[in-house]
Amino acid sequence: MASAAPGALGALRTGRVRLVAACCARLGPVAWAGGPAPRRGYSSEVKTEDELRVRYLEEENRGIVVLGINRAYGKNSISKNLLKMFSKAVDALKSDKKVRTIIIRSEVPGIFCAGADLKERAKMHSSEVGPFVSKIRAVINDIANLPVPTIAAIDGLALGGGLELALACDIRVAGGTQRLPRAIGMSLAKELIFSARVLDGQEAKSVGLISHVLEQNQEGDAAYRKALDLAREFLPQGPVAMRVAKLAINQGMEVDLVTGLAIEEACYAQTISTKDRLEGLLAFKEKRPPRYKGE
């Protein structure tokens, strides 16, 4: 699920990193914490401008796009406006061939995303709730299906839909329940939800929930800095190959091995006629770095 709802899985704390599985309707289905827990009941009434900042990095970081969540007054909770901004940004990024890697981070210290804006949710008519939750799920699915690598830089608390957002990314760096089993396996996901057992950061990493566990730095952006380092490693790679590789992995994991291999073959076939493939072969022959254009 993508919203704060009954049934829960608790928190990942960076520095003293921990993943807490807690059956708590107030916290929502999944939570991941990297700072002091905020008070519940977040308001979206103060202002709505710049709730999601889209930055296209330049110079040596050209090709990296950073989506910065910036709802300090609402603990980065997901409001109608923030969801609309996410949807608009993701739609634009889907077809932007200049984009090589996307980082999702918080620009608010101590919080990644607190899930649904519960004060706004409480004011919704019952007929609005279902479509709103469906829209959250659709946007998170769109993020999962972006054609370039995505990295969640989690430098703070993530609750409910906040962890669903992180789980939709390809890589999670840490300073609903439907995505969790796919990340760590159904048996362990159930064990964590049912037992409220605590995992430290290394255990969370060992089961594949996160890729990197970092001690938080003084600036509070250790996860973002690591995410940026990873994004720089991806930049020299061929955009076409990256796109079809992600597609093959995502679709292949949902089917049996034989079908997965067929998907992989079909994805490779998409690269055969591309200029990037020929450039890669030529660069290898000439013993120079390839100059890929995504064509």
Image (cartoon, rainbow, N blue to C red):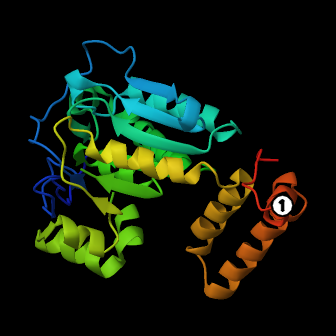
- Whether 144 is drawn above or below 211: the answer is above
Quadrant of the rendered image containing residue 209: bottom left
- Whether 117 is drawn above or below 22: the answer is above
Judge by depth and name the residue closer to the eye, 57 or 126.
57
- Name the image quarter holding the N terminus: bottom left
- The residue at 22%/33% (across/down) is 118
Q: Which residue is mark 1?
A: 286
- The residue at 19%/64% (across/down) is 201
Q: Is residue 294 left or right of residue 273?
A: left
Q: Position of residue 230 (x, y in %)?
A: 46, 52
Q: Is residue 7 left or right of residue 36?
A: right
Judge by depth and name the residue closer to the eye, 159 or 61.
61
Can residue 2 be seen from the camera position used here? no
User: In what element is the residue under mark 1?
Assistant: helix
Q: Residues within 10 Å of mark 1 (few under 14, many from 20)?
A: few
Q: Position of residue 172 (x, y in %)?
A: 37, 56
- Farthest front residue? 287
Can residue 260 be seen from the camera position used here? yes
Q: Position of residue 195 (x, y in %)?
A: 12, 74
- Farthest right residue? 273
Q: Amino acid at mark 1?
A: Glu
- Farthest bottom residue? 258
Q: Is residue 100 left or right of residue 267?
A: left
Q: Position of residue 273 (x, y in %)?
A: 91, 60
Quadrant of the rendered image containing residue 10: bottom left
- The residue at 30%/12% (across/down) is 47
